[in-house]
Amino acid sequence: MTPVTIFIVDDDVAVRDSLKFLFESEGLDTEDFASGTEFVGHSRPAADDCIILDVQMPGMSGIDVLSRLRREGSVSPVIVATSMPSSAMTKRAYSEGAFRVLDKPFDSDALLGAVHEALHLAHRPATAEAV
């Protein structure tokens, strides 16, 4: 089984570094990107990987990245992170296919719980549909 990767997309280097440390201390592989443009230009996550997208980044916002991923057929679970939550942004994130929307600063336990839940669901075998 190929190890999963947690993709961290955030323009704040301190956030990226702290999240890398958190996930790697849990034995998870990480890749980090300083912008949405950098991420979509260099990465192709597998369906069982997890992506953490900051909403507010220069260039492509996290919601723009999420929308593009879904248009391109990606089913990787995406956790959207925001330091300025609003009901409109949350609604849009979920309508674009976000797995979860979390507020910054992160509660480490809540973030790890969301990532583990996303990874568990991504690895769940498809069930056969009744004919």
Image: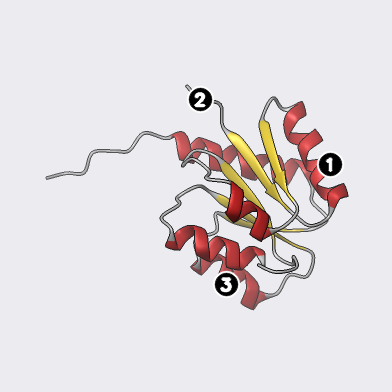
Badge 3: residue crowd in 10 Å (few <14, some 14–19, many ≥20): few
Q: Is residue 45 above or below residue 39?
A: above
Please name the residue shown 70% across and 69% down the image.
59
Q: Is residue 9 above or below residue 95?
A: above
The CA span between labels 2 and 3 is 33 Å
Q: Secondary structure at mark 2?
A: loop
128 relative to 42 in the view: left or right: left
Which residue is at the far right?
Answer: 14
Res 53 quadrant in image? bottom right
Q: Judge depth for marks 3 and 1 and give the one in front.
A: 1
Three-letter amino acid code at disc 1? Ser
Which numbered dot is residue 2?
2
- The mark that comes first in sequence, 2 or 1, is 2
Please name the residue shown 55% across and 59% down the image.
98
Badge 2: residue crowd in 10 Å (few <14, some 14–19, many ≥20): few
The CA span between labels 3 and 1 is 27 Å
Please name the residue shown 43% across and 58% down the image.
72
Q: Secondary structure at mark 1?
A: helix
Quarter of the image containing the C terminus? top left
Q: Which residue is mark 3?
A: 91
Three-letter amino acid code at disc 2? Thr
Q: Verify CB contact (< 8 Å) between mark 2 and mark 1.
A: no
Q: Measured from the top left, where is residue 47 in percent x and y?
A: 46, 42
Observer-nearest of 101 and 3: 3
Badge 1: residue crowd in 10 Å (few <14, some 14–19, many ≥20): few
